[in-house]
Amino acid sequence: MAKLSVSIGNLQLKNPVLTASGTFGYGIEFADFINLNDLGGFIVKGTTLQPRQGNDYPRMVETPSGMLNCVGLQNKGANYFCQSIYPQLKDLNTNVIVNVSGSSPEDYAECAARIAELDNIPAIELNISCPNVHDGGMAFGVTCSGAASVVKAVRKVYPKTLIVKLSPNVTDIAEIARAVEAEGADSVSLINTLMGMAIDIERRKPILSIKTGGLSGPAVKPVAVRMVYQVAQAVKIPIIGLGGITTAADAIEFLQAGATAVEIGTANFIDPAVTIKVIQGIDQWLNEHNIPDVNGIIGAAL
Amino acid sequence: MKQILNLILVHISHPSDNHALMVLKSEEKLPEILPGQFVEVRVDNSPTTLLRRPISINYVDKVNNEIWLLVHAVGEGTKRLCSLKEGALVNCILPLGRGFTLPECGEKVLLIGGGVGTAPLLYLGELARSIGAYPKFLLGGKTSADVLQKEDFRRIGELYITTEDGSEGEKGFVTNHSVLSAGEFSRIYTCGPKPMMMAVARYAKEKAIFCEASLENMMACGLGACLCCVEKTSEGNLCVCTEGPVFNINKLMWD
């Protein structure tokens, strides 16, 4: 067996496979199918300071090799997470990471500070890139100053590992990555969903309730690999790559593009045990290629 | 406990041009399945179909360790499922969702279905009868050909039919059927097109009859992880896949 452990800042992962926020619930939903402790970690659904109802139905539509969603950060808020979910997760032997969202830099910071109090949550992922909410989300992630303002506010109150999830819906993702690195982010994760639309041609109307949504799934993978490759040349902090990963080969592609770890998202919907298969597949590939340590292939294609 | 199983398609028939009845056998003992629960079926060899398809469990044959799925071919994924041949392996996640509340012994219950929404009512009726309740079925369709599995339903309880063109049973919609005027039912269960279920819900509310409806919202994961399939309820947006698909009508914000 190859060495699979990697580091993201102070965060030690037993293997480079995480799950993407919004596709894995609170993890508990997948406990019938996999041992959560076998993951490098998992990122729970987007959490905001106050509860959010999310957008109206319809919230999803299948597209060629992908899907659009406009869930809109439905969640029961930070207090609910702390009081009802955290007790169920705190004794797991893996990294439980909370994805944090907000409507203003202060809002993000207050939510992050609340999560910081939880001893066994070693990191947060800041979502400045959700395309499905009007107040906050991607609004911060599409400009360097907006992204920097959120990271700056959160960094003041959040001392643990800070991952910032970047939007692909920008002209130059590398400059956004540099901006958040400058404000003290420990890592960047990319990409969030690509903004898209689908139309019901019989009704002659967009299908989703808010007309547009975020595209995920295998369709976005080449875009995500390209962006990881670009950002890997722009920043020194470790990158977590995601976007359309369904197999170990996909994950290895991201690692070779410069990612230190990967997140698996939409594929969890099709195979709830896909994460374990990817971990085993990475190990098998390394063994077949006589590579003793997964760190040996990170950035190999750069 | 939810499981991912490769089931063997031991029999497939086509009760209409655009429906298939699939009989799927498990080599492992099937988990306990409640009426109203569903499976997420993976669609293989279909490049344009990424997500699994949620399909109601039509019937559970515990003796043979088989489940029946009645599939309506409406899109690329369901068309692909309907074209499978006997012997195929069908990858399913099951059992999913919250099922119907079973009636008590001696209760008279009415099961109202339309289109492929009749599917979960067969197993519900069977279990209701097995615990000593008296199930009757009221099924509707555009034409006689749209009302499927009539003989299977008749084996369990009395069957009433409405068709919009009057080709079988009473002409009109299910909510106009004369069996409703008898008013002898203590529970109503419904599954089918939303306008039909909304009309049934209005009737049940007026008569103060316990009523549950099974919803068919579009979903992705089926596990409560993606929050795509939500329905507005008096408790906020709830997932049809985990907090449904069966809801008490008093909880639904249909008014």
Image (tube, coloured by chain):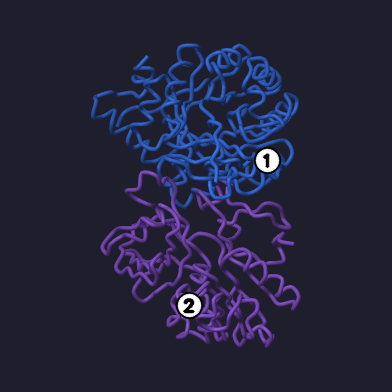
Residue to which mark 1 is pinned: A82
- What residue sits 59% from the left and 42% below the top? A206
Picture quadrant of residue B193: bottom right
Circle 1: element type = helix
Amino acid on which the number 1 mark rests in the picture: Cys
The answer to whether residue B140 shows anywhere in this view is yes
* Residue that numbered label 2 is attached to: B144
Q: Nearer the viewer, residue B208 or A124?
A: B208
In the rendered image of this protein, which colour is used for chain B? purple
- Tell me what hue chain A is rendered in: blue
Q: Is residue A81 above or below residue B159?
A: above
Q: Which of marks 2 and 1 is in front?
A: 2
Query: Viewer-proximal residue, B148 or A300?
Result: B148
Residue A216, position in %: x, y?
A: 49, 36
Give the percent coordinates (x, y) of residue A119.
63, 33
Instruction: Name the residue: 47% across, 46% down.
Output: A269
Q: Residues within 10 Å of mark 1 (few under 14, many from 20)?
A: some
The chain to which mark 2 is attached is B
Q: In this view, does B118 lie above or below A34?
A: below
